[in-house]
């Protein structure tokens, strides 16, 4: 079992045990996080849905990311990751939102180097983002981002209280 699959199994189990739901918003991973969760038996008990928001227009119109933030910071930004995660929570009606945005390559994007990734986590308490610098080819960077997102999701689920 891959690291991502093992982490997804733990996240699904913990979310179900706490009666929590999850929504995803993904750019560079294009659905890998949601798919990895969905590959886990029992995921239907916690995974509300996900949004693949590859283009800024989708980040703004579906997830509610501020167009002024996107214009000022570009799509590869911690604030954008936070807004995407919060947008996933709201769009999916979930307790926890997780997002990915970054540069998988082969070229830099929005002035950010290949391998720059931001993971966003949002709960009722607020949103936060985490910056990573991964190396490797396009697929490797996307896989590392997926693994990091699942690890951050698991950590967030550990911190959130039980929902009745």
Image (tube, rainbow, N blue to C red):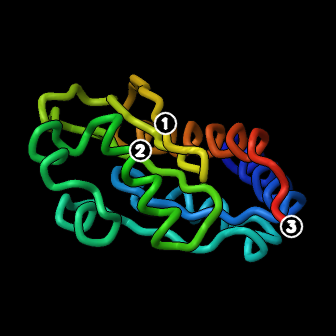
Quadrant assignment for the C terminus: bottom right
Residue displayed at 47% across by 43% down: 120
Q: Nearer the viewer, mark 3 or mark 2?
A: 3
Residue 132 in the image: x percent, y percent? 43, 26
- Circle 2: element type: helix
- Circle 1: element type: strand
Q: Is residue 37 left or right of residue 100?
A: right
Alpha carbons under labels 3 and 2: distance apart: 26 Å
Query: Circles 1 and 3: CB distance less than 8 Å?
Result: no
Most distant residue in the right direction: 17
Q: Quadrant of residue 27?
A: bottom left
Residue 102 in the image: x percent, y percent? 32, 40
Q: Quadrant of residue 134?
A: top left
Viewer can see residue 37: yes
Residue 130 in the image: x percent, y percent? 47, 30
Residue displayed at 17% across by 47% down: 70
Query: Circles 1 and 2: CB distance less than 8 Å?
Result: yes
Say which of 96 and 152 sits in front: 96
Viewer can see residue 1: no
Residue on which disc 1 sits: 128
Q: Nearer the viewer, mark 1 or mark 3?
A: 3
Alpha carbons under labels 1 and 3: distance apart: 25 Å
Q: Is residue 159 left or right of residue 153?
A: right
Residue on which disc 2 sits: 82
């Amino acid at each position: 079992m891959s690291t991502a699959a093992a982490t997804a199994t733990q996240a699904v189990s913990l979310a179900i045990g706490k009666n929590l739901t999850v929504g995803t918003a993904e750019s560079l991973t294009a659905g890998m996080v949601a798919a990895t969760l969905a590959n886990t038996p029992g995921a239907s008990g916690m995974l509300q849905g996900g949004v693949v928001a590859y283009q800024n227009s989708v980040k703004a119109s579906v997830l509610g990311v501020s167009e002024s933030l996107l214009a000022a910071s570009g799509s590869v930004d911690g604030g954008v990751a936070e807004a995407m995660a919060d947008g996933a929570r709201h769009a999916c009606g979930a307790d926890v939102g997780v997002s990915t945005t970054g540069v998988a390559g082969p070229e830099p994007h929005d002035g950010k180097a290949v391998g720059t990734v931001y993971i966003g986590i949002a709960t009722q308490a607020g949103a936060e983002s985490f910056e990573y610098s991964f190396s490797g080819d396009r697929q490797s960077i996307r896989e590392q981002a997926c693994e990091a997102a699942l690890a951050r999701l698991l950590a967030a689920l550990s911190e959130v209280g039980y929902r009745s």
